Amino acid sequence: MQADVVIIGGGPVGVGLAIDLAINGVSSVVVERHETIQKIPKGQNLTPRTGEHFRRWGVTEAIRAASPIPRNYGSGGIATYGTFLSDYHYEWFNRAKIIDYYAATNERLPQYETESVLRARAAEFDQITFLTGWNFQSAEAHTDGVIVTITDTHSKQIRQLSAAYLVGCDGARSQVREAAGISQTTDPHDRLMALLVFNSSQLDKKLSVYGDKTIFNAINPDMKGYWQFLGRVDLEGNWFFHAPVPAGTTRDNFDFHAFLEKAVGAQIDVDFEYVGFWELRLSLADNYGKGRIFIAGDAAHSHPPYGGYGVNTGFEDARNLSWKLTACLQGWGGTHLLASYSAERHPVFASTRDDFILKSIIEDREFTEAYNPEKDLKAFENAWAQRAAGDDSMVTQYLPHYAGSPIVCGQPEARSGATGKHGFVAQAGHHLSPLPLSGDDELWDHLGAGFTLMNLTGDTILTEAFSSAAAARGAPLKTLDLAKTGLSDSYKAEAILVRPDHFIAWTGSHADADAARILDHAIGKFGDDQ
C-alpha cells in the first residue's frame, strides 16, 4: 500500500494529523495497534486553541455533542489546601479567561470521546486509510521515501507500506522514535503515580459546595509539591484521580479507598473501575525528526497530566507539521522548511516543562514548606490569600510561540517558548488573535487554507507584490483587503502574513515589505536553497 504519509498511532494526535493532511489533499495510512479505543479518561482539559483545530477539522459540533459535561461547568476548577473539602480554597485554572484571543472556546471531554469523534470524521475522507490491529515493526528510509513494515497483532501477518514520510504518533514509548535513532532527555522524579477511575455519588454531593466545577487540586504538604488531582468524567458520579503513592504500591497491597477518603477529607462511597500506575517523569526528544521520519505528541514529549498540556501540545504538533509536509509534497516548500518543525516545537515544550510544570511543582513545594496553618495561622492565611488573588498564570501566561523560529521574520534575538501575555498586537511568530469584523462576520472564516496576506491599509502595490511572489513559488496565498475594518490600530501593523497554521510569519509596514524575501523565508527557502 502506498500513501503520501504513514502515521503510526491512531490516537487523537495521529488522527488529527491525518485529517489536517486530508484537508490539504494529502493521503495517509494510519496504523493503530489497538482494535478498539481505550476508555481511560485522560486528555480532557482542551484549550481554546485546540478548539480552533476542531473548527478547521469540521468537528466542533460533534465534539460538543460528545461532551458528557454541560458547558455551564466550563473548564475552571478549585485549588484547595490539604484536602479537597478544605476551608482554604480558591478559583483555579479557568481557561475562559483567554477565550477572547481565539476563534473558539475551550472544551472538556474524555480523550476516548475525542478519539471517537475524530475517527468518525477521518472516515469521511477518501485520503485516509485506517488500519487497526497492526503493530509497527520497522522503517527503512531512502532518499525519496520510507518503507514501513507492520505486523498483524493476531496472525503476525507482515505487510509493507510505502510513503514519502513517516510520522510516529505512537506514545511515550515510541517505537518510531527508537527506529529513527532519535534520542531523548528524561527528567525522572522518582515518584510512582496512581491513576484511579471510580464512581462515587457521595463525592458529587460533597463537592457540590463549590458549584459547577470539573477539576480540583489539593495542595497537600505530604505530597512535596506534587498534585493530588481530581476531575469529573461526567455528571453521573464518575471521577478520575491521580496522585503519588509509595514505591512498590500495587492494587492489592494498598488501600485506595482510604487513600481517597484522606485526600477528600470525608468518608465517601467508592466503586473502582480502573487502577493504573506510571512513573512520574518528563521526557523530551532531542529532535522531532530525522530525515523523512518525524514524531509528534507523546512520542516527542511526555509529562504527568499537569495543566492539560499534553494532548493540546500534540494537536499543535500536528498542525505545525501538516502544512510543512504538504508544502514539500506539493513542491513549494524549501529545503529548510521541515527542519523548522523541530526548531519551532521543541523549545515550546521545553518551556512548558520548565516554566509551567516544574515551576508549579517547585512553587507548591516551597509554599507548603514555608507556611503551615498549625504553626503560624496568620502568615499562612496571608500567603494563601496572595495565591488566591494571583492571575492564574498556568492559563493566562501560557502562550506558545515561535518568535525565534528560523522561518519567521521577527527580531534576531527573539527566542521561542511557551510564556507570554495574550493580546491583539500582531507579533511575528505568535498566534494571530482574530478580531471581529462586523456583525456575525468573523475574520477567522476569511483566512485562507494556505498563507493569508492581511492588507490592513489597502495598498494595492503590496498585494500585487505578494501575489506575484507566491505565484512564482507555487505557494498558496489568499489576500484580504481589510483597509475599511480599522484593524490596523488594534494589530499595530499595516500588513500581516499569516501562515497555514494561523501563526504570523511576518508583520510590518509597506515600506519594509520585500515580498519575495519574506515568502522565501516563510517557506524555508533561504541560504543554500536560494
Image (cartoon, rainbow, N blue to C red):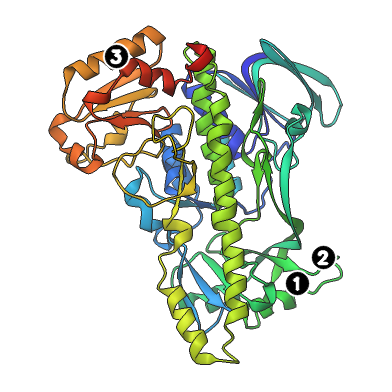
Which residue is at 16% across, 35% downward?
485
Decide: is 111 above or below 509. below
Q: Hey, which residue is sitting farthest top in the picture?
A: 472
Callout 2 touching callout 1 (CB < 8 Å): yes
Marks 2/3: CA–CA distance: 63 Å
Left or right, 402 with reference to 1: left
Residue under the point 45% across and 61% down: 393
Residue type, label 1:
Phe
The residue at 57%/45% (across/down) is: 349
| Residue type, numbered disc 3 | Ser
Numbered disc in front, either 2 or 3: 3
Q: Is residue 37 visible?
A: no
Front position in the image: 155 or 293: 293
From what the image shows, is residue 270 above or below residue 429? Answer: below
Q: Secondary structure at mark 1?
A: helix
Q: Closer to the camera, 260 or 432?
A: 432
Q: Which residue is mark 2?
A: 251
Q: Which mark is residue 467?
A: 3
Residue corresponding to mark 1: 256
Q: Earlier in the sequence, mark 3 or mark 1?
A: 1
Q: Is residue 108 left or right of residue 342?
A: left
Q: Is residue 240 above or below residue 140?
A: below
Q: How many marks?
A: 3
Q: Nearer the viewer, residue 324 or 442?
A: 324
User: As shown in the figure, which amino acid type bears the numbered disc 2?
Assistant: Arg
Q: Position of residue 30 (x, y in %)?
A: 65, 27
